[in-house]
Amino acid sequence: MEFIQDLIAALGAMLNGIPQAIMAMGLGFSTFATSIGFFVGAILTFVFKSAAPLSFQAETLVLVGQQGENARERYSIVFWSSLLLLIIGLTGAVEGIIQWVGQDIIDGMMAGVGIMLAKIGVDNVKASTYTGGSSLITAVIIYLFTQDLLWCLIGSVAISSVVDYYFAKNQPVAETSTETKSFQFYKPFFNSNVVKGALSVTSLSVATSISYGLITGQMTGIEPNPVNVNHYATTQGVSNAISSLFGGAPIASVISATGASVQPVRAGILMMVILGALLAAGMMPKIAKFIPSTSIAGFLFVLGMFVTFPSNAANALAVANNFPAAMTLIITAVIDPFTGLVSGGLLKLFMSIL
């Protein structure tokens, strides 16, 4: 019975990752290569006995898509950011970063990311009026009534996919990756986009490893929080560093329903294995034929404007002398998370000296 409950939680969390998997395909990532990341992540989750699994995360995918102008740049951004995150995790530097900039700056950066997500959602509506628009309207209505992100995601994707099938077939569709069940090595390289993107993704990964990882840990009801953020960062770094060399998409920290299951570690591993198996079997391109990439517009908007922005902005601005946190929020939303994080940290240091 406990296994069945864990399996149900794993399947629910897996459904949450499917639209983001389709988004990853639209950015040129190989789902077959991404399955490597899931399998490696599942192994390390078992080794570390972590209650927090990895999955597709909208925030990271959006950021990688913004920073990389083509697929090769995106692969390199994922690789170098994973290497940086791996170093941070292995050296136990996650807590050190929080202590240096302060939790208010981390919260300000996450609030800025919320605005970024909401903007991407609106841009999807502009790109596909019927599909994106129906997704946004449905997502907002469902979330206001249920306060449940999973139902918000499922409902908005389902409704907008039906709308797309009947009304929006002539609208532009995002280009998806060419799937092959063979390994093609992509040598990472540097340019200005890759460097800026890798630093931004690393900053976001540190922040979400702390916030999303610990939230999933809290869902277990175990005290103290069972999620070790350094182990979590290490798992993410190793998984993505390996898969990105073959064109795999980033998998990242998420708030996972598996945290509330009977055996959260087992449920999280089940979710990662199931999703990895679907990717390896080449099921995502088939699913993508029925789910348009712009169907995630509503979820991105709700995740950004209703979930990520309000709580993080409130925490960031609740502290005394909150000007650095406010500037972090604005700079992150306008430029990128790394610039926001560093700017906020330096401004806070400068103000403390004065």
Image (cartoon, helix red, strand yellow):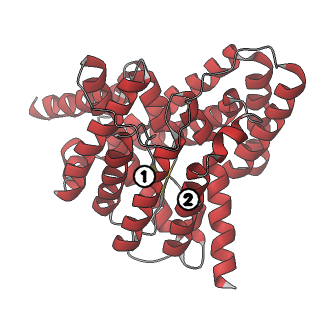
Residue 103 in percent (x, y) is at 31, 47
Q: Residue at x 54, y 30 (%)?
A: 117
Q: Which mark is residue 142?
A: none
Q: Quadrant of the N terminus?
A: bottom right
Q: Where is residue 253? Give x, y as percent.
A: 44, 52
Task: Kindly state the secondary structure of the residue where label 2 is placed.
Answer: loop
Outermost residue, front side: 182
**Point 36% across, 65% down: residue:** 44
Most distant residue in the right direction: 166
Helix, strand or loop at disc 1?
Answer: helix
The quadrant holding residue 164 is top right
Query: Along the horizontal axis of the image, is 348 left or right of 210?
Result: left
Looking at the image, tell me whether mark 1 or mark 2 is earlier in sequence order.
1
Choose mark 1 or mark 2, whichever is in front.
Answer: 1
Q: Residue at x 40, y 37 (%)?
A: 184
- The reply to whether residue 319 is in sight is no
The picture places residue 285, in percent across and down from the top left corner, at: 66, 38
Q: Nearer the viewer, residue 113 or 101?
A: 113
The local crowd at label 1, few if under 14, some if 14 to 19, many if 20 or more residues have their Cα within 10 Å, is many
Residue flagged by tag 2: what amino acid is it? Ser
Measured in 3D between alpha carbons, the distance from the residue under mark 1 to the one under mark 2, in whole angstroms, is 17 Å
Circle 1 sits on which residue?
37
Q: Is residue 280 left or right of residue 85?
A: right
Spot the residue most to the bottom: 1
Circle 2 residue? 256
Depth order, front residue of 176/282: 282
At which x and y percent is residue 246? 39, 40
Name which residue lies at 28% across and 32% down.
Answer: 187
The amino acid type of the residue labelled 1 equals Gly
